Image (tube, rainbow, N blue to C red):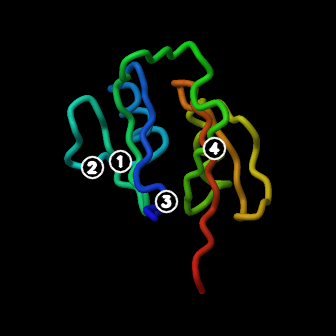
Amino acid sequence: MPHLIGPDFIGIQVADLDAARAFYTEVVGLTAAPFAPPGAVVFQTAPVPFAVRLPVEGFDPSKALGHGIALWFGCDDADGLHQHLIAQGVTIAFAPKDGPFGRYFAFQDPFGYTITAHTVQQAA
């Protein structure tokens, strides 16, 4: 029987593509990929690519975006990223704490999405 393998691309819709590119590159520190389809910015994230894109039909940015969906990003230092985002004026959903995947916290992007960042444990 055919079956799903797992996520291999994550994209969120935003009403302002330039503002989304600026937030995710200049504030969060992601790098935009050199190529993306029209109306989208793809970032060089691994192992799963992440993108922001202009809305598809029926998009309403006044609704609770991503409600019920957990978007987790690995990072090299959750506490350091938390402090950096606070200095940039980013809204923090909850402060760093220890969890099953190491230190983690969540922030809100300017478009209404909540992003969780956790320190990726390096293999010894």
Q: Nearer the viewer, residue 8 or 62?
A: 8
- Dot 4, how many residues are within 10 Å of its Cα: few (below 14), some (14-19), or many (20+)? few
Q: Which residue is labeled 4 in the image?
A: 70
Q: Which residue is mark 1?
A: 43
On screen, residue 45 above or below 84: below
Q: Secondary structure at mark 1?
A: strand
Camera-side mark, 4 or 3:
3
Task: State left or right for residue 46 relative to residue 97.
Answer: left
Q: Which residue is mark 3?
A: 6
* Mark nearer the N terminus (4 vs 3): 3
Question: Pointer 4 and pointer 3: residues touching (CB < 8 Å)?
Answer: no
Left or right for 111, reference 31: right
Q: Which residue is mark 2?
A: 33
Q: In the rendered structure, which amino acid carries the disc numbered 3? A: Gly
Depicted 117 relative to depicted 41: above or below: below
**Is tag 2's residue or tag 3's residue first in the polypeptide sequence?**
3
Q: Label 2: how many residues lie within 10 Å, few (<14), some (14-19) or many (20+)?
A: some
